[in-house]
Image: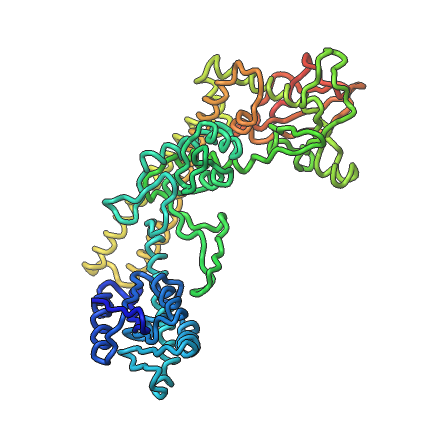
């Protein structure tokens, strides 16, 4: 039973236990500490006492609820004596523990007793060794911390989820420790985000779409007036997270020191990723495709007096130097087209130029000047052209693309499968040869020296055969992945046969890059060529040539540079 006096200062019986003390250490349990402290206080004439208990708090950090309450009571002159089981119960940080024992407690005329360590501040001779014991407790804490961290790293290195909040959309498997499963509600939301990204949307547009649909964002605890709002940074974090393809990231950050609160984040390029560790919300192919789309996408750019949403951002490059084609606003252009008598759209005021030319001038690279409207119409025409071909005979279109990417697909696949079978057969033969040699050695037919020579030769050849098997299997897997990519592209472009406008989602879904050539004069006419490189399949080529006559867009003569 706790006893507390409201008139005279009391004795504080402080108990602390953390996971670093070990769950099987009964002597450290809170109940045993309370019993020991109670018996000591009552047997030494300290009947007025109160318990201060921190259960589950590390000794390296003094920001514990009960300990902070104890400090406040000491400052309010409610406590005149503090008793702990040993010095480590007060804390394991020797610097802070020493400051409390040697500075704070004496300043407030508080007696400190650590029972099992034989420390009593009223007996000065017993305090001489106290700093050394605090150092030993600190070293013990460091050692335990290293062991715990090593255990976590080993477990994480096995692809198991150790602790902390799970990624949104995934929850812990109640039946298998360290394994994640898909959350029924949030998993659908994560899938929705990836579907929007696969559809060509950037993180900003996905954010706006999620907020427009009022999709709940359970990751944020603070509820806004219009529901849980999504942020662009949160969308980008989700799209980059390998956990959603079923992979596990061993470590994303590390703490600089045991006492340091500074955490260094490990760059994404240096993450150690283990594949196939738990249920996946998206396939590996879908996740990889999203990463490619993110890498190519660039932000919209600001121009004077307006904002142009650059749908070609991240796609347009100079054919000569490879630099990005940067847009600028042409203010001198009239607001009404003289030929069509129609008001010009924002696109009609934008012109692209080689960024290296813009920065360093024409002595480094020509301007490669290209009107945005001309670019728009040519790309739209080419996409529709190939989409119509794909719609007329989908199977032939797919096979032609596959042959373009892989060569004669059926012939190459047959050769690779035959080669793989031959290599596996040879590996079995080598196994049999080794067993036969071993039997001959056992029967005395082969000498030890001769057997060693034969065994070494077999092992060397077998190592080469196994390496070739792995290489061929990898090539077969790559071809299978390419076939899936080609199938994806064929399905997507077939949907574009009747489109009337381009969007950044569509462009980033279909096109890898567009290269702009320098304007050339041919027979008195200025001609400029474009090269469209489609995602997964490269250049498709066209049966007409791309031309911009005298710097003006002429729809009747529009075409693209034929594929090489």
The residue sitting at 32% across, 82% down in the picture is: 120
Q: Residue 42's spot in the image, x, y percent? A: 21, 76
Q: Residue 528's spot in the image, x, y percent? A: 71, 24
The residue sitting at 35% across, 79% down in the picture is: 111
Q: In this view of the protein, can residue 343 be seen by the observer?
A: yes
Q: Residue furthest front?
A: 7
Q: Residue 31's spot in the image, x, y percent? A: 21, 66
- The C terminus - image quarter: top right
User: In screen coordinates, is 82 left or right of 387?
Assistant: left
Q: Residue furthest left?
A: 443
- The N terminus - image quarter: bottom left
User: In screen coordinates, is 198 left or right of 444?
Assistant: right
Q: Is residue 62 above or below residue 131?
A: above
The residue sitting at 42% across, 65% down in the picture is: 258
Q: Is residue 366 above or below residue 435?
A: above
How does the figure colour the protein chain or chains? rainbow
Instruction: Please give the count of numbered marks on the rendered protein.
Output: 0
User: In screen coordinates, is 191 left or right of 527?
Assistant: left
Residue 4 versus residue 214: which sits nearer the camera? 4
Q: In this view of the protein, can residue 146 be seen by the observer?
A: no
The residue sitting at 23% across, 80% down in the picture is: 44
Q: Is residue 209 above or below residue 246?
A: above
Q: Residue 390's spot in the image, x, y percent? A: 49, 17
Q: Residue furthest right?
A: 524
Dividing the picture into quarters, in which one does residue 53 lie? bottom left
Residue 368 versus residue 22: which sits nearer the camera? 22
Dividing the picture into quarters, in which one does residue 502 lie? top right
């Amino acid at each position: 039973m706790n006893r507390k006096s409201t008139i005279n200062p009391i004795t504080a019986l402080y108990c602390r236990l953390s996971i670093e003390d070990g769950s099987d250490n009964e002597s450290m349990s809170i109940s045993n500490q309370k019993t020991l402290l109670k018996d000591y206080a009552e047997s030494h004439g300290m009947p007025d006492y109160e318990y201060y208990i921190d259960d589950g708090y590390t000794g390296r950090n003094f920001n514990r609820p009960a300990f902070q309450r104890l400090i406040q009571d000491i400052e309010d002159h409610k406590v005149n004596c503090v008793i702990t089981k040993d010095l480590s119960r007060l804390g394991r940080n020797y610097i802070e523990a020493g400051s409390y024992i040697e500075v704070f407690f004496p300043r407030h005329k508080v007696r400190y007793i650590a029972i099992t360590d034989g420390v009593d501040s009223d007996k000065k001779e017993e305090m001489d060794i106290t700093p050394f014991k605090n150092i030993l407790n600190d070293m013990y804490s460091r050692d335990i911390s290293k062991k715990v961290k090593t255990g976590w790293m080993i477990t994480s290195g096995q692809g198991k989820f150790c602790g902390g909040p799970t990624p949104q959309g995934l929850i812990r498997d109640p039946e298998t420790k360290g394994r994640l499963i898909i959350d029924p509600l949030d998993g659908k939301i994560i899938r929705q985000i990836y579907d929007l990204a696969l559809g060509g949307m950037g993180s900003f547009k996905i954010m706006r779409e999620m907020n427009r649909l009022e999709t709940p964002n359970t990751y944020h605890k603070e509820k806004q007036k219009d529901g849980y709002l999504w942020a662009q940074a949160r969308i980008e974090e989700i799209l980059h997270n390998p956990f959603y393809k079923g992979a596990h990231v061993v470590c994303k950050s590390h703490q600089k020191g045991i006492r340091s609160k500074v955490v260094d984040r490990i760059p994404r390029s240096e993450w150690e990723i283990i594949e196939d560790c738990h249920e996946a919300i998206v396939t590996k192919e879908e996740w990889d495709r999203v990463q490619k789309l993110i890498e190519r996408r660039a932000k919209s750019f600001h121009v004077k007096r307006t904002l142009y949403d650059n749908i070609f951002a991240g796609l347009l490059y100079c054919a000569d130097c490879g630099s990005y084609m940067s847009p600028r606003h042409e203010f001198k252009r009239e607001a009404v087209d003289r030929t069509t008598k129609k008001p010009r759209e924002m696109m009609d005021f934008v012109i692209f130029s080689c960024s290296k030319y813009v920065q360093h001038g024409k002595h480094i690279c020509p301007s490669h000047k290209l009107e945005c409207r001309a670019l728009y119409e040519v790309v739209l025409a080419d996409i529709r052209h190939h989409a119509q071909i794909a719609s007329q005979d989908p199977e032939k279109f797919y096979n032609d693309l596959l042959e373009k990417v892989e060569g004669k697909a059926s012939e190459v696949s047959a050769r690779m499968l035959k080669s793989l079978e031959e290599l596996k057969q040879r590996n079995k033969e080598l196994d049999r040869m080794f067993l036969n040699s071993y039997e001959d050695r056992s029967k005395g037919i082969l000498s030890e020296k001769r057997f060693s020579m034969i065994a070494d030769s077999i092992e060397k050849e077998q190592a080469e055969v196994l390496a070739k098997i792995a290489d061929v299997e990898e090539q077969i897997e790559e071809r299978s992945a390419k076939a899936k990519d080609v199938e994806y592209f064929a399905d997507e472009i077939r949907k574009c046969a009747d489109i009337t406008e381009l969007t950044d989602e569509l462009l980033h879904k279909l096109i890898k890059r567009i290269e702009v050539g320098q304007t050339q004069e041919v027979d008195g006419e200025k001609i400029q060529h474009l090269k469209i490189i489609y995602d997964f399949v490269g250049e498709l080529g066209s049966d007409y040539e791309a031309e911009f006559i005298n710097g003006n867009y002429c729809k009747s003569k529009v075409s693209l540079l034929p594929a090489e």
